[in-house]
Amino acid sequence: MIDQLAYEFPLQSGLAYLNHAAVGVWSRRTAEAVHTFADENMFQGATDYPKWMKVEQALRQQLTELLHAESVDDIALLKNTSEGLSVIAYGMDWQRGDNVVISNQEFPSNRIVWQSLQEHGVEVRTADIACDDPEAALLACCDTHTRLLSISSVQYGTGLRMDLQRLGEACLKHNVFFCVDAIQSLGALSIDVQAIHADAVIADAHKWLLGPEGLAVFYISPAWREKLKLHQFGWHMVENIGDFDATSWQTASSARRFEAGSPNMLGIHALHASLTLLLDIGIDHIERMVLERSSALIDMVLEDKNLQLLSPSQWERCSGIVTFRFKSLNQQQHIELYQRLMKKQVICAYRANGIRFSPHFYTPYACFDLAWSRMMACCND
Ligand SMILES: Cc1ncc(COP(=O)(O)O)c(C=O)c1O
């Protein structure tokens, strides 16, 4: 396994890549799929387009499996998470006085779109989830006017993992649309969209799925698929997709109804290759490896009395993200530390007023020691 991972992830030596929560790396097979696709385009154009369509279908099957969706018809391929959230926000039939519940730790994509509805009389309620029971804080914001609850499966700053099952059950009981931004967990942590009663789950490919930017999976429950009003139209979203001469048309009954035009075939080839690796290894196995790595990093933080852990430490609350700060450094000094780390090839992020490390399942433990020693050297410079 270690040999296979070293083969699949031949990262430049000396590079401590701890930034999958921003943009993940590609495996060798993903890079090769892109090279092959480029060569094919260069030497023969789209001569084999039917073969490309088979890759597209295979990708939809892989995503159905990854999400434990009921059917491939529940999956659309969109541009990014923000687009998927917008499809939902502008697909629902809002009434003045309705409200949406989100958390105070959401990435802007999962806040701005709901705030944009305020001009239509929709209230946005923001739960403070920096507490012992974040799900209870979210549910306490809900009332009889709550139409939708939208939450990141894992918070981008702290790495807090939400109890999606509990939220989904409560939403189901109270007839609230349950929307999950899964970009910070899909590919690293398991998810079962049916078990958690999700109405929509969206994630772009470029983080934990180890794929390209600009291609996102959009899951929509069968119950909601035909209820969302459409705002994008084109040849690709009709039932009889190849019938270009027809002057009348019907919207596709599958989630393809949300895909207006030509698919991102390059991205599809790349993500398909990434998913062959993730599904071969198995998401449960990957999740264990991710959490073991986070756990090791958390131990390193907790062992140093100069550091404060900003991420949760309980196993069920952990994710691939570990964020921490130096007790003695202010915000500006953390930004400077982050810049020095990047110069020393420790690829990480400045988030939640601290340093965010986000290794993936394949990251060698030696990478942590390397990052740590460079970080301590930065502090002593
Ligand atoms: C939780 C979360 N949602 C959404 C996004 C952005 O997604 P996209 O660029 O696919 O719209 C990010 C990016 O960091 C994120 O962390």
Image (tube, rainbow, N blue to C red):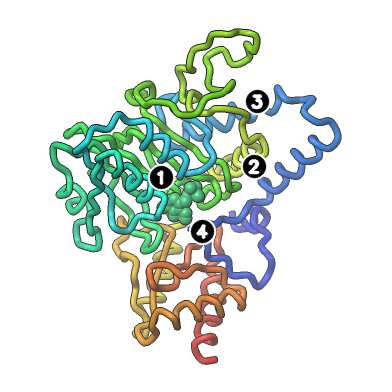
Picture residue at 29% right of the left edge, 58% below the top = 104
Q: Which mark is residue 190?
A: 1
Q: Are marks 3 and 4 in contact (CB under 8 Å)?
A: no
Ligand 1 within 8 A of label 4's CB? yes
Q: Secondary structure at mark 1?
A: loop
Which quadrant of the structure image shows residue 150?
A: top left
Under mark 1, the amino acid is Ser
Q: Which residue is mark 4?
A: 22
Lateral position of residue 367 relative to residue 7, left or right: left
Describe the element under mark 3 as helix, strand or loop. helix
Distance of mark 3 from mark 2, alpha carbons? Answer: 14 Å
Distance between the alpha carbons at the discs numbered 4 and 1: 19 Å
Alpha carbon of mark 3 to alpha carbon of mark 4: how far? Answer: 30 Å
Q: Are marks 1 and 3 in contact (CB under 8 Å)?
A: no
- Residue that appears at 52% across and 72% down: 368
Residue on which the image places disc 3: 53
Question: Which amino acid is tagged 2?
Answer: Ala
For marks 1 and 3 on the same chain, the one whose residue lies earlier in the sequence: 3
**Proximity of marks 4 and 1: CB atoms separated by less than 8 Å:** no
